[in-house]
Amino acid sequence: MKIRQRIAEELSDAFPGLQTETPGEGRLLVLAGKDSVIAVLGYLKRRGYNHLALISCVDWMEEGEFELVYILSAYPRGEGGAAAREELSILVKTRISRKRPDAATAIPVFANAEPLEREIHELFGIVFAGHPRLTPLFLEREYPIPPFRKDFDTRQYVKDFFDKIPEVQQE
Amino acid sequence: MRELELYFGPQHLGMVGNFSITLKVEGDRIREAAANPGYLHRGFEKLMEYRTWIQNFPLVCRINVVEPDHMELVYAMAVEKLTGIEVPERAQYIRSIFLELSRVASHLFGLWAYANMLGFDTVAQWAMYHRDLVLDLFEELTGGRVYHIFIWPGGVRRDFPEGFQERIVNTLHSIGGCVPDYDHTFFNNRLFSKRAKGIGKVTREEAMEMGATGQVLRAAGMKYDIRKVEPYAAYHQVPWEVPTRKAGDAYSRIRVVRDEMIESVHMIFKLLDKMPEGKVYNRAPNPFKWKVPAGEAYVRCESSRGELGLYLVSDSGDKPYRAHFRTPSYPHGLVLLEKILRGASLADVGNIMISLYVTPPEIDR
Amino acid sequence: MGHKYSLHAVYFCTGCGIIEIPPALTARWDAERFGIIPAAAPRQANLFLITGYVSLKTLKPIIRTYEQMGEPKFTVAFGSCPINGGMYWDSYNTVKHLDRYLPIDGWIAGCMPRPEAIFTAITHLWGMIDRGEADGYRRYRRYYRQYRANQERVLGRLDWPPLRGED
């Protein structure tokens, strides 16, 4: 409880106007603006939260926005051992517009953001400025819209594309 | 010397799973490596958005085929966190025993893969045989050898059948009795240490920089295990230790795997002794009308490869709005592999890849 | 007929189903009683076990591996996914009916099929070989234009030349 409050206060001091919430035990939610999210990640990494577990993206189609979620936790110092300190996972969220989905890359802060951002670019269509390698990671074909967006209906796509492939006719 | 581009491709005897690495090789040394995933991509998370909460259970375990139970666990834990369903005490113990048996089976599979790749066929056959004995236990408990669909929100699906505890103990004793043979033939073998010592070295700082978890960290000297850091199920009820090593190379990683298997077996015996009586599940709501309240949850557990997490978002509908799995093989196979293959010998690619415990279906989902 | 008792399976882990192949090949279930051993390269194999679902990216290496195998060669589709899509019937990245792209001699249903199901399938395959019904490789040559057209519909232009004319 105490560490969570302390970090929330430090963040509000360092980044005025930043909102924080405490949704449940061991979790801290930080809502950052599009331009300050990389700076917030750098601040938290220097503060000791140096493990980027996940970068996720949620498509809020009705609101016209993508929400990028960065999930951080802390590696133990030194050799680890008994958890004497409070365990906390921090979720840093930011929203970007669906019509012009650009964001800044987090690679300068966390080296393992590289494939995560590449995957989000491929599946959602978000362009990360400064990323060295935004080439396809998983997909083989081009799809009419990036497949994880909410307006891509995968069942309709299967009906239109795969089911129309003809069977091999044997005389 | 000229540079060649080679594909350590999907059809290869040193590859477990469907994964490809594009190598730029000069003579025998690798200059550059680029991982090429995507051969197993099914769009899992998109498929989950089209199925109701209960229909997702058979789907979720198929993400990692070697060890499907931890996927069920994180999904059940995330749904319990969103809905507030409690899990009875006996179900927590049964979950822990089940997950530790799954860990033993998964490590035996990993031992088969590693020994097979090195050419130690004898130990590979033994490991696969012992894994089959554990799968017999699963088949008796859940009906399926590979995909169990046993853990769901509110507990587990059914209680242990009559005499099951003795059968677990007997099976584990018969596997444990062969550990001196394994040690004598494989783990203490001079050929294995010549082949694996100093290969694929990852220091603690490099591992932290690349986001690695699991054996990669523990073999580099850091005691980091989610079962100790953020305990779930019944892991905090029995005393147990996290095995670590110092050197960070392939040899240390495989030794950590061996120590973890033995620790899991001891943990199962302690949990069986301490397990209370009681019911094994709290009723979930009517699956046809089940709507989970809006919110989001991030839960994590320690699978046999590292930290497995799930970020689940619900908008109070009857299907998940977004589910995103954080799988442990993702940083190992895509970030760490490219870095430590640089400068390695061509003969060691399979060695490094399997000692990092990369499982391709987890990367692609 | 002699080759039915030494079917060498090419070692290619294509999908989920790879989890039940090592138990079938090792000491407990012992496929070597049936003459099945794994082969390292497709040039040395005559049985192709397509284990589990086939994503679009995997279809390319599967076609290349299949075309490299020497004839007579037999394919067995393992699992429910190559039959009609299986668990991932609504996925945008998996192939639903594998026999529109490659000739399949036999299917094993299940998710996962047990090792005993593999052996039952192999004994069925022996019967088919004896009766001359396991002619997937001949069908591939005879109807190659249709197979290739289907392959190019999903994969785009293929960068290897088409096979020579029919047998």
Image (cartoon, rainbow, N blue to C red):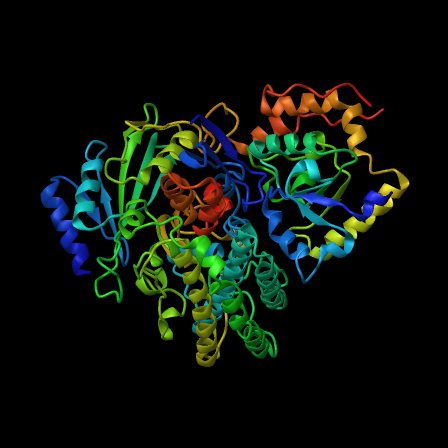
- Residue B304 shows in the view: no
Is B205 left, or right, of C93 in this rendering? left
Depth check, front residue: C11 or B241: C11
Question: Total of numbered circles in the picture?
Answer: 0
| Left or right relative to B256: residue A52 | left
* Residue under the image location 55 percent in, 65 percent down: B157
Q: In front: B185, or C143?
A: B185
**Whole-percent x, y for residue C83 in the image:** 70, 40
- Measured as percent of width and height from the top left, residue B203 is found at 30, 51
Extreme residue toward the left, this view: A13
Which residue is located at x 56 percent, y 32 percent? Answer: C57
Q: Is residue B287 above or below residue B264?
A: above
Residue B104 visible in the displayed image: yes
| Image quarter (top left, top right, bottom left or bottom right) of the C terminus of chain C | top right
Q: Residue furthest right?
A: C131
Residue B186 is left or right of residue A167, and the answer is: left
Residue closer to the observer: B300 or A42: A42
Spot occupied by residue B57 in the image (x, y as percentages of width and height): 53, 53
Judged left or right of residue B208, residue B168 is right
Picture coordinates of residue B319, whole percent (x, y): 48, 45
Looking at the rendering, which quadrant does residue A84 occupy? bottom left
Which quadrant would the N terminus of chain C be assigned to in this image? top right
Q: Residue at x 34, y 59 (%)?
A: B218
